[in-house]
Amino acid sequence: MKNLHVELGERSYPIYVGSGLLDNPSLIAPHVKGDECLIVSNETVAPLYLDRLRSSLNVAKVDSLVLPDGEKFKNLDTLKTIYDELLARRHSRGTTLIALGGGVVGDMTGFAAATYQRGVNFIQVPTTLLSQVDSSVGGKTGVNHPLGKNMIGAFYQPVAVIADIDSLRTLPDREFRSGIAEVIKYGLICDASFYHWLRDNASRINARDEEILAEIVYRCCKAKAEVVARDERESNIRAILNLGHTFGHAIEAVENYQGLLHGEAVAVGMLMAADLSWRLGWLDKDAVESARSLLDALGLPLTAPATMSPEAFRSAMALDKKVARGVVRLVLLRAIGEAVVTGDYPVEKLHDTLEAFC
Amino acid sequence: MKNLHVELGERSYPIYVGSGLLDNPSLIAPHVKGDECLIVSNETVAPLYLDRLRSSLNVAKVDSLVLPDGEKFKNLDTLKTIYDELLARRHSRGTTLIALGGGVVGDMTGFAAATYQRGVNFIQVPTTLLSQVDSSVGGKTGVNHPLGKNMIGAFYQPVAVIADIDSLRTLPDREFRSGIAEVIKYGLICDASFYHWLRDNASRINARDEEILAEIVYRCCKAKAEVVARDERESNIRAILNLGHTFGHAIEAVENYQGLLHGEAVAVGMLMAADLSWRLGWLDKDAVESARSLLDALGLPLTAPATMSPEAFRSAMALDKKVARGVVRLVLLRAIGEAVVTGDYPVEKLHDTLEAFC
């Protein structure tokens, strides 16, 4: 097992990465504060891991709630079922919420924890690659609105993140690849040597080699923890973590969260960001092609789905959280391993990119 | 005009108390950060004050949303209409939300501000006595759940509170008296001399004497600002502000927020707390009678409504946020001007109080 720490003063917390962590009572017990807790999971993950997690909890009252699976359920209606459960079972302000599942479960459970009785204790047990390398760390919680992704939410840090890489074995192929997209993101935005290491190890990644996966989760958590420690509330540097996300969120929203998975949409979005960076003269054509071939080698989509038009992109992007004074701020690349956040680009170049990918 | 400051480090903010503040552009303008804002009000307050407030804003885009009036609308469904409006009108993370109205408008708008795009700028313009002396200060925001009051919420501070006492003139009688209950609360919990001053000025209060009202709003805001500065997240001392609220919330919840107003329910609850304090031998019978006669002189109810039974109280109180390990922690009185928070009392005495008031 490897240990990391997110340094956020009194909100600091550990991340545990390794094998066989899910039912290790010595890991989770110190982080459950009171004598009651609610495990929130989904219908896919619960049959596999809920009993194992429950067995590691030495708490008088352990309730559980199983949500439907999928991004399309990440909304206020599903959130309300968490509040209903907490109140029906009379959970007090001293309760602990435990998210067992992927990013959707983690984001919704975290937001419920942030807002139930104005804030209760919260633990992340991510079981997908995407949530282990990205969404479980850093305290972004929330739900989608029909007009935009993650539009309702809060910054709320967990007290611990327990990433058991054994759970990646049961991950369906598309889910796994969706997580890989966020892994590549870290290479593109801040770590060229990690990017090249990924390229060198593409076949072992596709084979889900355990040693490689442990290394991937550890390095991504480390990168994310460092960025979050520097800028918890995304005043500046943290925004680079959104590479590909403005384009990707537009795709997800237009497809009503029932088309491409989040990581797949981000993969397309990262390539669009690379393309636009090239059109602006910031990035070599070779670097764009390298990114395209790495995404391709790892089984990720390279063009926007047929549902998308330039107009659909423009309309959905205008609602992005990174809009400031009418200008869409984008994360772009100066080189592989070097991202910038900017609203300072000729809008025609953006339109050229949209045309090229639709 | 009088000025106060809530001292909370980087979240500190001013409270302005006085006459003619609502359309004074020099007060509000410095607190609107971007070039867009949404005023949230209700159908009772908007016709009286919305245009005046709007005229004081020198911002490119000023939208407004008028909610239905009443505690029974303080729920997730109404909250959703605020998100819908913000997104339909494409408000960015740089927007400012302004709450124009009473506690319900303030609590819901504050929670929307806390959670829209993970937090936007927020200004309180309270127009009722209750919101001016209590709910607009201190950052408690949220909505009710069918199973309990304020069960979903966040601590989120405004950047300014503008309390225009002129707006108290148009307040319906019951609303005014509901606010007076919270005023008496400050005397009971921490300021015996203020309590006696209120008793001496009961007839001028009933006449809504302007000078008296300005003094009341100022002194209550000062008391609240001091308590909040010491304990923003209610780890300890802040809980005394809930005198009468556990009993009061039970009444409101059982009546489905359509019976007694919040302050009326708190008035009954404070008297119940005084009664229990007397049964525990902590408070003189004379003090209980003094509180009863002051509440009576100021037109507040003294017994629980006919809908309440001891069993209804017990069941609703078991869901209170102040429950810890199955025990209901209550705010009780050691003397007029001295409150304590405790779960350490014989439960039969509580049952005696419930019997006495039903």
Image (cartoon, coloured by chain):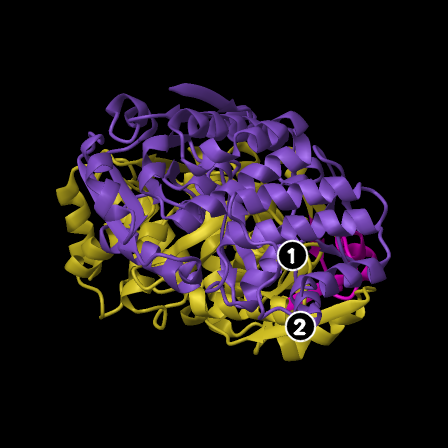
Chain colours: A yellow, B purple
Chain assignment, label 2:
A
* CA–CA distance in space, label 1 to label 2: 30 Å
Q: Residue at the location (16% across, 42% down)?
A: A347
In this view of the protein, can residue B8 be seen by the observer?
yes
Front one among B124 and B331: B331
> Is B253 placed left or right of A243 in the picture?
right
Callout 1: 10 Å neighbours few (<14), some, many (20+)?
many
Q: Position of residue A164 (x, y in %)?
A: 68, 61
Chain assignment, label 1:
B
Question: How many numbered discs, if any?
Answer: 2
Picture quadrant where residue B119 is located: top left
* Residue B247 numbered tag: 1
Picture quadrant where residue A67 is located: bottom right
Q: Position of residue A73 (x, y in %)?
A: 44, 71
In this view of the protein, can residue A333 be seen by the observer?
no
Above/below status of A9 relative to A242? above
Magenta-drawn segment: A15-40
Magenta highlight on residue A17: yes
Front one among B94 and B356: B356
> Is B191 placed left or right of B66 in the picture?
right
Front one among B132 and A316: B132
In the image, what residue type sits under mark 2? Ser
Q: Where the C terminus of chain A falls, by quadrant?
A: bottom left
Q: Position of residue B35 (x, y in %)?
A: 23, 34
| Secondary structure under the numbered disc 2 in the rendered image | strand
Q: Position of residue B55 (x, y in %)?
A: 18, 33
Q: Which residue is mark 2?
A: A64
Task: Single out the mark in the foreground, 1 or 2.
Answer: 1
The lab-note entry on whether marks 1 and 2 share a chain reads: no
Callout 2: 10 Å neighbours few (<14), some, many (20+)?
some
Q: Residue at the location (71% across, 66% down)?
A: B314
In the image, what residue type sits under mark 1? Phe
